Amino acid sequence: MTDPLFRTDAYLQEATGQVIAHTPEGGMVLDRTVFYPTAGGQPGDSGHVEWAGGRLPVATAVKVEGGRIALVPAEPAALPPLGAEVRQRIDWNRRYRHMRVHTALHLLSVVIPLPVTGGQIGTDRGRLDFAMPEPPTDMPALEAALNALIGRDLAVTDSWITNEELLANPGLVKTLSVMPPMGQGRVRLVQIGQGAGQVDLQPCGGTHVARTAEIGRVTLGKVENKGRQNRRVTLVLE
């Protein structure tokens, strides 16, 4: 398996790693990586790797079999050989914006407490689809409530529970279309706020900021109708 360094430190921007495999599609698999792979609506990280005699831009990262993560080159080029040690560095500005948007979407699911049917994260904006038969009647109030939560500068932390504990507490899962990853025997929970000040707790494997104030102010776009029971709400970083 690839050791996902981003899971224990989302602010880690670079690290060394050893090439343990090449994929048939032309990617490289490292034993440990700072690159987040595309998952849960969050894009894979971009950046570059360097090794003795070479440098390669990385377009994205993806999950491959066996709990491994493959880095996908931005252009066809010779890969570092198996066993080579590489220094990997992510595009931090892009990743950090993903972290801000992702955390903001967790808070959006707090101010709109409805089941989530889909979502997508970008560098400037993100969206959630809700099981929402009727559109909200007061979007300015929702936007104000969302920014008030952000402004409280709440701590964002994580913990782990077993698969069995999650199955015994189905209310933790807000998404209807996708179940959280459960293949490792445990599930990561992301918590916003502490103790009596907790506002959100849900399974998530993505990267987040450490405190909500890092998100900055956001604006909400108009609600889009995506079917009889589905409506899409978009937020934009200011």
Image: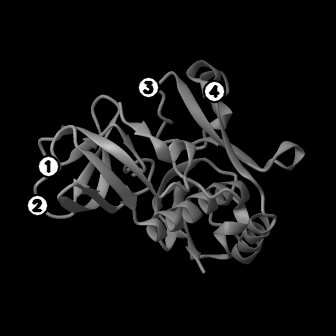
**Residue that carries the numbered disc 2 in the rendered image:** 76
- Asked if labels 3 and 4 touch by Cβ distance under 8 angstroms, the answer is no
Observer able to see residue 122: no
Observer able to see residue 97: yes
**Residue that carries the numbered disc 4 in the rendered image:** 161
**Amino acid on which disc 3 is placed:** Gly
Instruction: Find numbered disc 1 in the image and state the secondary structure of the residue it sits on.
Output: loop
Instruction: Find numbered disc 2 in the image and state the secondary structure of the residue it sits on.
Output: loop
Q: Residue at x 35, y 55 (%)?
A: 88
Q: Is residue 196 above or below residue 182?
A: below
Identify the mark nearer the N-term, 4 or 1. Answer: 1
The C terminus - image quarter: bottom right
User: x and y percent of residue 223 in the render?
Assistant: 56, 71
User: x and y percent of residue 187 in the render?
Assistant: 56, 31
**Residue that carries the numbered disc 3 in the rendered image:** 183
Q: Is residue 198 left or right of residue 169?
A: right
Crowd rating for badge 3 (residues with CA inside 10 Å; few <14, some 14–19, many 20+): few
**Amino acid on which disc 1 is placed:** Gly
Q: Residue at x 40, y 61 (%)?
A: 90
Q: Residue at x 15, y 64 (%)?
A: 75
Q: Is residue 14 above or below residue 68?
A: below
Q: Is residue 174 left or right of residue 181?
A: right
- Asked if labels 3 and 2 touch by Cβ distance under 8 angstroms, the answer is no
The Cα–Cα distance between marks 4 and 3, rounded to whole angstroms, is 13 Å
**Residue that carries the numbered disc 1 in the rendered image:** 26
Instruction: Find numbered disc 4 in the image and state the secondary structure of the residue it sits on.
Output: strand
The Cα–Cα distance between marks 4 and 1, rounded to whole angstroms, is 36 Å
Closest to the camera, between mark 1 and mark 3, is 1
